[in-house]
Amino acid sequence: MQLTDLSVLKQLKHWLADSQPVWLCTIVSTYGSAPRPVGSLFASNGKQRVGSISGGCLEQAFFEKLVAGDFQQQAVLFDYNSQLNRSGQPSELPCGGSIELLVERLEPSHDNINHISQWLKLAEHYHPFERTINLGTAAHGLITLSDSPKKEVERSAEAVSLRYAQVWSILLLGISQVSEHVARIALSAGYQVRICDNREEMADAWNYTADQGGIDIEWTDPGLFVEKHSGPRSAVLALAHDPRVDDIGLMTAFGLPSYYLGAMGSQATTRKRRERLQRICQFDDATLDRLHAPIGLDIGSKTPVEIAISIMAALIQAKSKTVV
């Protein structure tokens, strides 16, 4: 699931612990230009709301139905486009897409609080997992999966099973102003972010530690760092602008699965890096062509934050085209 949905689960748990009934919406299927992926969450206690299932329009429509006394069932499937709005006209998303939701009414019980706590724990530890909801009894269950699922939803007349894959991650090589801005944007966008460096003299230059809401540096060999954390849902970004960090991490990254490899530097720096990697590692052109360098979309970025934006735009673009 997207890490941005963790805030929904945390608020849901808080409302239940405060003896408030809540309504939880989960996207089960989409068609057309629906702006949020399957599995996205939205919740309300009837007064406040958190999360997103459409980008704004559907949340308000759902909230109006909730205030009007709809959705008293414990678990029900709701197809937005098949419903009529208050004026008697068919509902339609402005984007032209359609969204089907699983709507659950959760009472403030020990069982529900425990279920949300377990769900939150699985999501925070980045395990692939499955959540099943019985539409007749509203019974729910969670199981850990051994690998990222190929199918997001399994359904029958009696139940809906939603499968959540491992999150997408970004592995940052090296402390720099750009890597700090990338970390800030990436965490806000729901990525898991890790950073390593082997230059401990750079410690004072990192101003986005875990106690500041960011991440702590892993002081280790960049090659070992990439070997430990890289996977098909990982992007490896060489942002140190120092071969002692960038090259070492990239040498390992070329031999491992990742959906994006990128390195910061000018065209001249990129040519020199390519020559070094060919000379030292005997990489062929096809292997080196996996590296996006200079990194990021060409939007004319100059400042560290602009470069970080161009990098994140390139990662999102690449992720949307990746099948894992």
Image: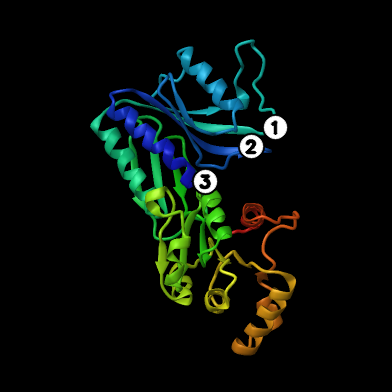
Mark 2, other Cα within 10 Å: few <14 / some 14–19 / many ≥20: some
For this rendering, which residue is in front, 96 or 167? 167
Which amino acid lies under the numbered mark 1 shown in the image of this protein?
Cys
Residue assigned mark 2? 34
Say if residue 324 shows up in the picture. no
Whole-angstrom CA distance, mark 3 to mark 2, is 21 Å
Q: Which mark is residue 95?
A: 1
Tell me which label, 2 or 1, sits earlier in the chain.
Answer: 2
Are the residues flagged by discs 2 and 1 in contact, CB closer than 8 Å?
Answer: yes
Which structural element holds mark 2? loop
Image quadrant containing the C terminus = bottom right
Q: Nearer the viewer, mark 3 or mark 2?
A: 3
Whole-angstrom CA distance, mark 2 to mark 1, is 7 Å
Which structural element holds mark 3? helix
- In this rendering, the answer to whether 150 lies above or below 78 is below
Q: Which mark is residue 188?
A: 3
Are the residues flagged by discs 3 and 1 in contact, CB closer than 8 Å?
Answer: no
Measured from the top left, where is residue 143 in percent x and y?
A: 35, 50
